Amino acid sequence: MKAWRPLLAWLLAAAALAWVLHGVDSRAFLRGVTGIRWSWVAAGLAFDVLSYLCQGWRWSMLFPARRLSPLQATRAIYIGLFANELFPLRLGEFIRAYLASRWTGLGLAAVVPTLALERLMDAVWLAAGLAASAFFVPLPPLLRRAAWILAAVAVLGLLTLLALLLRPAAGTPFLRRFQALRTQLRDAARSGALWRGFAASGAILAAQILAFWAIQRACSLPFGLGVAAVVLLVVHLGTAIPNAPANVGTYQFFVVLGLSLFGAAKSAAAAFSLVVFVLLTLPLWLLGFLALRSTGGTFSQLRREALAAA
């Protein structure tokens, strides 16, 4: 990994946080981080955990021959997310792929396509959500362009998926390189796992929106579920590119940007961006740490083993 990439990620995070906190009224900010209603926090954390359970279920369905159990998939996801909280540029995705490979005895070449398929499903749902939200709120030009780019990538990915599913086995020289993925996809399509995976992707996004909305209610922000959905979609789009660990800085930036579309005061939005970040991150750290301990290894050890396997 180039040394300048993590440094650039941290610089962007610092700049984003500086913008979020610039000009914030300290009294209004303190009011925003106090008086939290903890019953709504509990609901938000429950929905957040539910989203990762749905993700584990989806990944296990997409796995070749269903050799990865939902529990194993969820453990690997939490370990990968925990790694992403500590290291820049999404190193955790590589670690969770290695863990699944180790637990199932399959090579990384059979595991990585399942991660790519997950990302494609997420992109389709995100693009659809942003398109729907555009009817309710005018998105800034930069976000509109980013949404169009995401939609184009999702359509391209779907066309590639259809080509792999429908073209004859011989196909073109380019498609023949993806023969193993083609077999995987066809097996998943025949068993219905592919379509259930798309449905599970919608459930994941719905649980994430409900978690975000519950924390929004905990902080007494005067916005409904629709606003929470739009703001979270903006956050997902803004943090899609790998950056600093835990998306720190960029997460807060896009929360404030999203809430500003609905006229939220910057001080209240900045306070909420920090509260929702902490409340939804701490359980991930705890569960990720416990999942990592259950493997008997450390991140440095897993990283060395993953690189060796690759």
Image: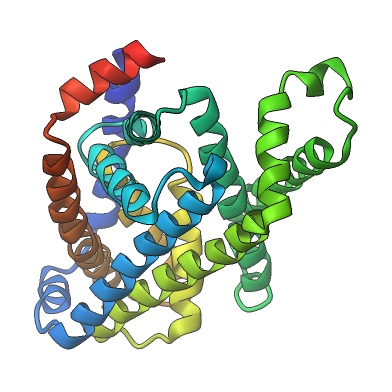
Q: Residue 103 at what x, y percent from top left?
A: 33, 35
Quadrant of the rendering where the C terminus is positioned: top left
Residue that appears at 50% across and 81% down? 226
Q: Quadrant of residue 179?
A: top right
Residue that appears at 24% across and 63% down? 280
Residue closer to the observer: 28 or 224: 224
Is residue 261 in view? no
Is residue 36 in view? yes
Residue that appears at 66% across and 48% down? 188
How has the structure been colored for display? rainbow
Residue closer to the observer: 79 or 18: 79
Residue that appears at 19% across and 67% down? 275
Quadrant of the rendering where the N terminus is positioned: top left
Q: Residue 176 at what x, y percent from top left?
A: 79, 20
In the displayed structure, 222 sits above or below 253; it is below
Residue closer to the observer: 297 or 257: 297
In the displayed structure, 19 sits above or below 274; it is above
Residue closer to the observer: 304 or 249: 304
Q: Residue 91 at what x, y percent from top left?
A: 33, 30
Q: Quadrant of residue 164?
A: top right
